[in-house]
Image: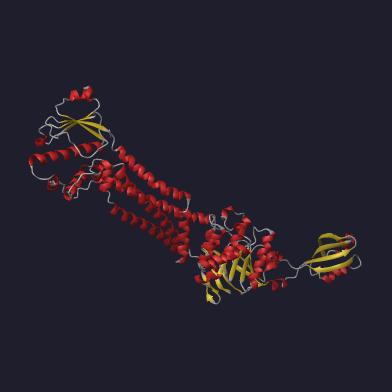
Amino acid sequence: MIEISNVSKSFRRKSALINVSLKIAKGTITGLLGPNGAGKTTLIRLMNIMLVPDEGYLKYDGQLLKKDHLKNIGYLPEERGLYPDMTVNEQLNFFAKLRGLSREEASLNAKYWIEKLKMSEWSHETIQSLSKGMAQKVQFAVAVVHDPEFIILDEPLTGFDPINVDLIKNLLFEFKEAGKTVLLSTHNMHRVQDMCSHVILLNEGRIVSNCSIKELLDGYESDRFVVRYRGTSIAFANALWTDFELLEQIEIQEGLIEAHLLKRGDKSVDDLIRNLQGHVTIDSVYREQPQMDHIFLDLIEKGNIE
Amino acid sequence: MRSVFLISWREIQQRVFNRSFLLMLLLGPLLILSLFYFLVQAADEGKKQVSVLIADPGDLLEGIISSKENTAVQYSFVSDYLTLTEFKTGKAYEKYDVLMEVNEKVLNNKKVFVFYRDFLSNSIQNSLRFTLERRVEEVIIEEFSDLSIESYRQMKQPLNIDFRNLENPTNARAGDAGWVGYFFGALIILFTLFYGMSILRGIAREKSNRVVEVLVSVISPGQLMLGKIIGIGMSALVQLLFWLLVISVGLWAFQGVFFSDFFLSESFMGMQFSEGAHEALQSEFTRVRNNEMIHLIYDRVNLGLILPFFFLFFLSFFTFVWRIFQLNRGCNGF
């Protein structure tokens, strides 16, 4: 869908992107991660032709990215912006027409999204009279009102209540099922893990990781274990010896305690079970799934350049 | 181009269907017309309702002055000499504001004295001058020729000998009309600067409410800027054209309602003139129309020339803004 080849972009002497190459496959939800100043916004702006690369090129569906492709791209910027004096309906119609839709198509699509996002009751109110959450919905609708194939969403769930978060999440899955491609830029690692099939990790203008979530998780073994046991906590702590560090433990049922451990050195699950046998009754032991935020921090720290 | 049109149309809608714009659309020309009216009135101070006593010892005028009813001037006749002291102090003459002395030799020496108690407004002076002049003409024609009045007036085209300075052969009176140039120049600058600022304000507003990020992801900054310039320029033109329309209608209405004394057709309504006589009268009337403001606005200001230049400057300014923006884009490479 989108192919970026050896793209570099600098602003004066500051390099925002350095020799970035990546592909975003059609019909996927791809997470774009990176700390502040990593170059995410620059990358997004290049995809929207708001900026032109100093080196390299971008392709859309095998063709060099050009203005004509913009009608197939939807963009929800992190810095939300709408005309405060226009009504919801006017706003959607205006942006749909600006994206190349005819008056009739724009009206039809605007109506569809107003109903889809449950905005009918206040579709004739101006943006300035809406709450932040309502305006966020309108902003989302503006990004997708022209039925784009490729949707770039920068922190799309910020400002939404849990009900609307669920609504938007479901919409993103609908997009994926309909064969549309979504690029989701966020700082929320759990959302990426939860929603994305692929992830691109940027740091200091370079790509640190670009793979599927599964590949990323599989490549990382967690240092943390969870043990559920019956017995005394003193006996449990003594059994750990110096091989494992007890992070926290809570009684989840009467007599059943769940403990979170961090391994020291090259210790394995077998070592843990061996240590505990004879001291407490083990109910279950498993390795914690690696969390995206841990992987993110680890990759950033290691400077693991692909 | 459709994007540019959409942006322009939005700008027009935002500005034109705005309460303050609509208010200014009506108030602006009304203020200008009021200002013009008060300037004319200020330049036409003096008594506007007078009672005139014509001392006509030779009974030349035969007790007739005009067939036209004039509500501002009431004429009475006395067929005797009247000294100035008598007129000034005599109880019988207290009610008269003006003494017009038409002696028997007036047909030869063409000299009439008009004495007033309080200063007379220009319109009254005009009215007295022309009414008496017409009547004396009629008397002369009756006395010395077999011509009809119409024929006489047709023949009476004054030989206009115009003395002009070699350095100023067109006799351009810069002092009189110069401020009109300044006024229109200032109006152009005012309009262009105001709407130029409006463009900058619009951009600043879109940057502050961040909608520009969405817009430039759809259209190029150049298209956005062009759309804004066209939209705001069109709003300015709408306002300007409406103002011109209202002011023109207002001036036309003023001509008939408030300033009728300054215009021949109104002053001599009901009188019959041949075409040539009418032209001669018009020319003479214009020459001596002695309210500077009226003379300037109705006779000297060449709106046919000013307006095309006005629009030319207006378009040039917006083209200039657009070029500056393109230059800036070229330099910054966005």
Q: Position of residue A264 (x, y in %)?
A: 79, 66
| Quadrant where the N terminus of chain B is found in the figure | bottom left
Q: Position of residue A183 (x, y in %)?
A: 61, 68
Does any portion of residue A50 appear in the rendered image? Answer: no
Residue drawn at x 25%, y 29% is: B118
Residue drawn at x 14%, y 31% is: B56
| Residue B74 as seen in the image, left or right of residue A114 | left
- Front-most of B67 and A166? B67
Residue A120 lies in quadrant: bottom right
Q: Residue furthest bottom?
A: A62
- Front-most of A117 and B177? A117
| Residue A299 as seen in the image, left or right of residue A79 | right
Q: Position of residue B191 (x, y in %)?
A: 39, 51
The image shows residue A154, relative to residue B64, as above or below, that is below
Residue drawn at x 30%, y 47% is: B180
The image shows residue B13, relative to residue B283, as above or below, that is below
Does any portion of residue A59 appear in the rendered image? Answer: yes
Residue drawn at x 9%, y 33% is: B105
- Front-most of A270 and B236? B236
Residue A7 lies in quadrant: bottom right
Q: How many marks?
A: 0
Q: How is the image coloured?
A: secondary structure
Residue A290 lies in quadrant: bottom right
Q: Position of residue B27 (x, y in %)?
A: 41, 46
